[in-house]
Amino acid sequence: MKKLFSEVPFLNGERLTLKRIEKTDADSLLELTGDPMVYRYLPTFLFEKKYPDIHEVIGKLYTECFQESIILGVYLDDALCGLAEMYGFRDEIHKISVGYRIMQKYWGRGITSGALEMLIRYLYDETDIEIITASTMVENHASARVLMKNGFSLVVSCVDEDWGYPQPTIADKWIR
């Protein structure tokens, strides 16, 4: 079994690849992070928005950021089309949370669901993770469908969470 945070995973599927983001992905990552439609249901404190220079973000993804979360690029035909994240690691109970964001031009093509399926398979088959959780804003029905399609169950609805906004965010909590 691999220990989370011992390496940056490289996950290669039939259609998608989840892997380390490289400096050559800067333009695509900038396109993703600049789209308000992609980020309307996400926390304000995401690492890829922490620094104004996208090259600095990429340079720190697997050093500074890697201490708390693992962010992988989601690639379709070698093109970066989104991000998949593992965060909130709790080693003592073998738990991790997952999240994702996909460029708007790739929505509706099963990419998010496929990327999440790859993360789940990796976490359960190659690590000692036993519990995978996710949180969604109540209004984010598309993300809820992706979670349900991948075997997540809604465990609590409409709870206050700190997502970095001035007021608490009303969120749903999921588990698999």
Image: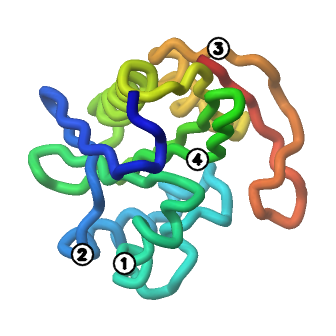
Can residue 137 be spotted in the picture?
yes
Marks 3 and 1 sit apart, C-alpha to C-alpha, by 36 Å
Q: Which of the 4 image quadrants contains residue 133?
A: top right
Residue for badge 1: 59
Task: Decide which of tag 2 and tag 4 comes sooner along the chain.
Answer: 2
In the depicted structure, whether residue 14 falls above or below residue 31: above
Residue appearing at x 70%, y 33% in the figure: 92
- Frontmost residue, 104 versus 8: 8
The residue at the point 52 percent across, 31 percent down is 142
Q: CA distance from mark 2 to mark 4?
A: 22 Å
Judge from the rendering whether residue 101 lies leftward or rightward of residue 110; answer left or right: right
Looking at numbered disc 3 in the image, what kind of residue is underneath it? Answer: Ser
Location of residue 5 in the rendering, given as x and y in whole percent from the top left corner: 47, 49
- 3D distance between C-alphas at marks 1 and 2: 8 Å
Secondary structure at badge 3 equals strand
Q: Amino acid at mark 1?
A: Gly
Separation of disc 4 and disc 3 at Cα? Answer: 19 Å
Is residue 120 placed above or below 85 in the rendered structure? Answer: above
- Spatial distance from mark 1 to mark 4, Cα to Cα? 19 Å
Q: Are marks 1 and 2 in contact (CB under 8 Å)?
A: yes
On the image, numbered disc 4 is attached to which residue?
A: 87
Give the foreground label among 1 and 2. Answer: 1
Category of crowding for the residue at label 4, using alpha-carbon neighbours closer than 10 angstroms: few (below 14), some (14–19), many (at least 20): some
In the displayed structure, would residue 33 be above or below residue 146?
Answer: below
| Res 165 → quadrant | bottom right
Tell me the number on the disc at residue 153: 3
Q: Position of residue 103 (x, y in %)?
A: 35, 53
Query: Reading the chain from its start, which is encountered first: label 3 or label 2?
Result: 2
User: Mark 3 against mark 2, which lies toward the viewer?
Assistant: 2
